[in-house]
Amino acid sequence: MFAMMKELPLSKVYQFIEPGPVVLLTTQVPGTKPNVMTMSWLMMLEFEPPLIACVVAEGNYSFAALQKQHKCVIAVPPANLAKIVTDIGNCTGGDTDKFGSFDLTPLPASQVEAPLIGEAIVNLECRVKDSQMVKAYNLFVLECVKAWETPKLKDAPMLHHHGYGHFSVDGERIHIKSKMR
Amino acid sequence: MFAMMKELPLSKVYQFIEPGPVVLLTTQVPGTKPNVMTMSWLMMLEFEPPLIACVVAEGNYSFAALQKQHKCVIAVPPANLAKIVTDIGNCTGGDTDKFGSFDLTPLPASQVEAPLIGEAIVNLECRVKDSQMVKAYNLFVLECVKAWETPKLKDAPMLHHHGYGHFSVDGERIHIKSKMR
């Protein structure tokens, strides 16, 4: 089941990527089923407009879709989706209908063809802004053009991947007075 | 107080960066005091040799040191250093002797001039491998050439920054059988 989403100001996007969560990346090539992959190699590059760097290995089904469509959605899953997140990482969109198999709810995005994920904490609609580093590092620079949050999941713990299915789940939240953005 | 370190195989470096921790970056320009900054925008680019992409804003004191020396250390602090990590992010090496002010222990590295941090979970000695994206994104590609872990802190929780001094601290660890590296 998924909860209602509302628009997230682009100036707040970094607050959901900077903590280093495992994310899901969705893509959609017209005429085919949408695909989703698990991704942990990403970071913020700029606050606003939000730029995000991510590595998508050339062997991935999503690599071709990104190269072709230049559009995707980054969805941050809550920690209770750990099993689904891991299982998605263990198969390929080449032979699996991942949305059909894994009980995620694809929802229409507003700016891109790739679907939002109904169960995610936030969904970031992105366009490929710079492919210059794809050849050397499989690194795409994405610009987030529209963002959605699920208020009900605002404080849901995220997942952080330590390799081979070992995750840490967000625990305590602390606040120390800071000028850091 | 700091505990004993031992060498960490380079093949395991990603296990400490992929989870998305806040890190400390140390630099050392010969003839000056070592400096340290707080950094949250970094990610893995390659498993082995380990390549790490990071953003160091041009205004930072560390930016000039990196541009000049091409060497640094990335140290992953345990969550109990949250106050120090935040305070370091709130001042500049231009007018503060950060190691002197913040009660961190600088230790000699083996391959670079920048110091290790005695209190860190891991310390990664790095060389700048690629500066091509500095102009567009302040993005440096680093190669980790030597890595150290502090066995006593192996399972210490890391910090994840959500903006303005709001952190989540690693809580529960879970393991789901996975082929994902």
Image: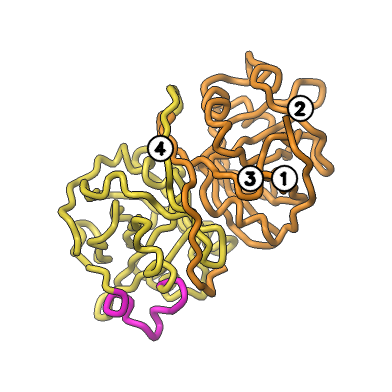
Chain colours: A orange, B yellow
Q: Nearer the viewer, mark 3 or mark 1?
A: 1
Quadrant, the C terminus of chain B: top left
Using the numbered discs, state the Cα–Cα distance from disc 4 to disc 2 in whole angstroms.
36 Å
Where A25 sits versus B92, above or below?
A: above
Chain of residue at mark 4: B
The kind of residue on which mark 3 rests is Ser
Label 4 sits on residue? B173
Using the numbered discs, state the Cα–Cα distance from disc 3 to disc 2 in whole angstroms.
18 Å
* Number of numbered tags placed on the structure image: 4
The kind of secondary structure element at disc 2 is loop
Q: Nearer the viewer, mark 3 or mark 4?
A: 4
Residue A10 appears at what percent x and percent y? 73, 57
Q: Would residue B100 be counted in the magenta stretch?
A: yes
Q: Residue at x 49, y 46 (%)?
A: A170
Using the numbered discs, state the Cα–Cα distance from disc 2 to disc 1 in whole angstroms.
26 Å
Q: Residue at x 70, y 61 (%)?
A: A11
Toward the viewer: B86 or B10? B86
The kind of residue on which mark 1 rests is Thr
Residues at marks 3 and 1, common chain? yes
The kind of secondary structure element at disc 3 is loop
Q: Residue furthest bottom?
A: B95
First-in-chain label (3 vs 1): 3
Where B65 sits versus B53, above or below?
A: below
- Residues at discs 4 and 1 in contact (Cβ within 8 Å): no
Chain of residue at mark 2: A
Q: Residue at x 58, y 31 (%)?
A: A81
Where A139 sits versus B109, above or below?
A: above
